[in-house]
Image (cartoon, coloured by chain):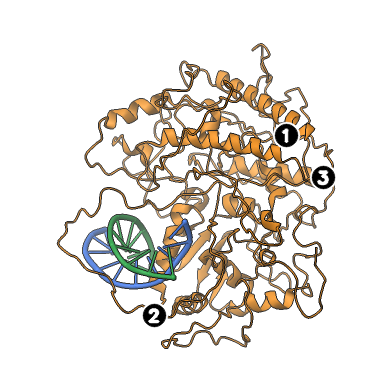
Chain colours: A orange, B green, C blue
Amino acid sequence: GKTQGRPERIAFPDWAYKPESSPGSRQIQLWHFILELLRKEEYHDVIAWQGDYGEFVIKDPDEVARLWGARKCKPQMNYDKLSRALRYYYNKRILHKTKGKRFTYKFNFNKLVLVNYPFIDMGSTGSNVPQSAPPVPTGAGSHFRFPPSTPSEVLSPNEDLRSPGGMFSSVARRMARGSVSDCSDGTSVNSEIEEGNAGAGEDRGERGYRSIIHPRLSHEALFRMYGGPGNPVGHPGSRHTGHRIHPDSLSPFPVSPLPGPGGAGLLAPPLSPALSMTPTSHLPYTPSPTLSPMLGSHFSFNPEDMKRYLQAHTQSVYNYGLSPRAFLHYPSIVIPQPHRPAADKHPPHSAHPHTHSHPMHHPLHLGEEPPHMSPFKFKLQPPPLGRKHRDSQSHSKPRQSSLSSGSGSMTSTSGLGSSLSFGSDLSSASGSGLISASSSMQSLNSAGLPKIKVEPISDIESEEEVEVTDISDEDPDERDEEFELFSPRHSRPHPDEDLDEDVFKAPAPPPPGLMPFFTSQHSNPPQTKCIPLKLRFKRRWSEDQRMEASQEESDDKKVRPEEERERERQSNGRMETEEDGTGSREGDSPPPLAYEGSLATPLASQRRVSAELHRATAQLSLENKDC
DNA sequence: ATCGGAAATG
DNA sequence: CATTTCCGAT
């Protein structure tokens, strides 16, 4: 710790300044920046929250672009470019466009940010409250603050996330603004002169998000759970539809991001994994009343609140159609599924939907250090596919060629690779066996289809061109935007095979009142050691990824298939073998159980998953235990 | 306005 | 990798 050390100099390690951004301290990202602007009153004329939760409007596109350009030292930035960047977020699911409203976009808070940055508080710095906070979905107006990260947050001990007088607040404050270093380039058109910003000085890492998010694992740990009702698990066709995000295949655990001296490297995980998507648009969007349990007042750490908090979150998962799969296996918490026969190998006898019975008490590691997380990384842009320009080579134009603003340089920053990692869905986990899916897929082409353009997102549906008529698209009525983004385009009509994620569909909606949810017994004292556990996670993640990868195959157009996958197998035979079902193409893994009628026996699937989950949990717990 | 492919960039 | 840049299409 060094926190307080020298008065005039801030002793915090570099990483302390960039909580949100990943480990490698990369440059600020656009959405972070947007969020930043959004929280400041000074910019209300330029950009502000408006409309639904998470929705914001850019009132002065040029200005926003200018600011952004200043921050990035890209004097030539303009709205056209900025908006392109914004559009890339659609695929990443960080944002989506609010149709019909000019310059209006919407953060996908429900799925991404909330999880990744539970603390996000859009309040403005000094004054709290004003409009900065987008309305919470449920209607509660206050801005919710989630429980602070766990104490163990190694990071800065006192770093009160938001206290204005915080230690490095001054720096942070400055940084928060645009003070970009000086983009030294002759062309520096202006750069930011914005309001009195100061001048920049040291800019260690740019940005000071300090308050916005401070995620950290702990929460993550908290969230990772969910067994889901929908635990789709078996849902055969599910798999994500095509979103192209899948976990990075590399090891999920970033090696310490910053090799830095402080050794703190681990602390800053990038974003946390989250929920992926897997949308399901057909859900009736229930206004989920539950979502805001503690909204009115402040949240407190006590177990009660925590519990509620989690419940709410879970509920939101249901309500928003998030993929439960994202939460699969997590030792820390397990949420009982609504229907779920007893887990474990118990005989299938009647299953009691809720109340499942075993209280598996999985400790929540609250004060603990979550094993570093694992961020799934998202893959977005498909790298240069093999397809190349279809258009022909006729034009060869070396884009801009010279020009470059030159300068650019500087920006010391580390440059480690970090990257966002949003959750991807681990579809695999559950071993989704998508029988039908695969069949359909194959039908598409087995040999390598020459060129079909597979739609990225719609994917699933891509195959069928069938009806679909118009139902979906179009219609201006803004259906819930929340879902809007989920629905690829046309969708839904066939419940039957639709492989998409209906994940939730089947299982009845979670009974609001009954969500026993995690029995939080927080018991384990913070032991930050146990690295092994970490390893275990890693293992799991690898598995998941592998699976996911396997199933990817044709879909994506975006997202690179990455070839990694199958890495090494576990030394012993199995352990977790959950997965499969999927393509089964790889051939090596043991044949998944054959789910008979995928639909018909969802239970079985679920059961299986549950069991696995349990098993895994137990296993992890055990292992963890000794560390 | 908005979308998204493609190539370039650091 | 996350844009930045350019651009044709809608």
Q: Residue drawn 44% across and 87% down?
A: A189
Query: Which label is found at residue A515?
Result: 1
Subunit bearing disc 2:
A
User: Residue A182: x, y in percent?
Assistant: 53, 83
1 vs 3, front mark:
3
Marked residue nearer the N-terminal end (1 or 3): 1
* Neighbourhood count class around disc 1 (C-alpha, 10 Å): few under 14, some 14–19, many 20 upward: some
Name the element at disc 3. loop
Q: Residue drawn 72% across and 27% down?
A: A618
Residue A341 visible at all: yes
Name the quadrant containing residue A614: top right
Name the element at disc 1. loop
Q: Amino acid at mark 2?
A: Ser
Q: Which residue is mark 3?
A: A526
Cα–Cα gap, marks 3 and 2: 50 Å
Marked residue nearer the N-terminal end (1 or 2): 2
Subunit bearing disc 3:
A
